[in-house]
Amino acid sequence: MQDRVVVIHQPDFIPYLGFFDRLLKADLYVVFDNVQYVRGSRAWTSRDKIKTPKGEKWLSIGIKKAAYGAAINEVMLRQDFEWRIHHMNLIRENYRKAEYYQEIMPYIENLYSMPCERMVDFNLKSIRMLMQLFDIQIETVMASSLKAGGKSNELIVNIMKELGCSCYLSGVGAKDYFIATPYERAGIEVIWQEFEHPVYPQQFGKFIPYLSSIDLLFNCGIEKSRKILRGKI
């Protein structure tokens, strides 16, 4: 097996900084697009947060009602532009006085102008936009293009085996359902992400962590944001 470091994660919408911290430490990103779409409080694939004068505010993607158990790559976007316009208005309203608004806003406008039918495609466009802004290059593979089967830990192990890779970088949230035995049997090393959220200049009072990465970019700009993400400031 190769010792390349692999990240396997759902294609979240305009993800927070910890998402990109993992990509910086990996050689391959497997987009978990064929696992079940999760609704409710854990639904980071269809929403994320920005900061407003009143605190956190959710940006939720407009999606069509999906069947129970539908995979992420089966969830379709609403084709009206109301939710896109709503997002754009919220972003403009809350970041127009941010120091780097003029630098970042054209990227956001370009993202929301792109036609997409599936949520996964829109999310991947947001991830690629942020990867470009953060200067992250990493090989990307769609899980749906692989033959690996199974559930939970078994599925991750089978993906790693199919890729011929032996080092899996996991977020700490996976510890709740992690079972070590399948990885040990397959000879796969599991590395747990150690991410300390950076504190940076932010609008509207007390610092709030774990927002969408666009918050850092609007407040600090491209060049400084790249350094902050890498712990160089």
Image (tube, rainbow, N blue to C red):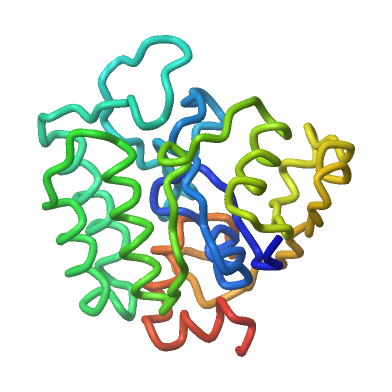
Residue closest to the far top? 68
| Image position, residue 16 (x, y; %) | 51, 57
**Residue at 39 percent of width and 63 percent of height:** 214
Q: Quadrant of residue 117?
A: top left
Q: Is residue 28 left or right of residue 78?
A: right
Quadrant (top left/top right/bottom left/bottom right) for the C terminus: bottom right
Residue 206 visible here: no
Q: Quadrant of residue 231?
A: bottom right
| Image position, residue 98 (x, y; %) | 33, 73
**Residue at 82 percent of width and 37 percent of height:** 182
- For residue 70, above or below residue 79: above
**Residue at 40 percent of width and 68 percent of height:** 131
Give 201 or 115, whichever is nearer the viewer.
115
The total of numbered circles placed on residues is 0
Give 12 or 74, whichever is nearer the viewer.
74
| Image position, residue 228 (x, y; %) | 56, 81
**Residue at 42 percent of width and 46 percent of height:** 142
- For residue 71, above or below residue 61: above
Quadrant (top left/top right/bottom left/bottom right) for the N terminus: bottom right
- For residue 121, above or below residue 7: above
Q: Is residue 229 left or right of residue 89?
A: right
| Image position, residue 47 (x, y; %) | 41, 39
Residue 66 visible here: yes
Q: Is residue 58 left or right of residue 191?
A: left
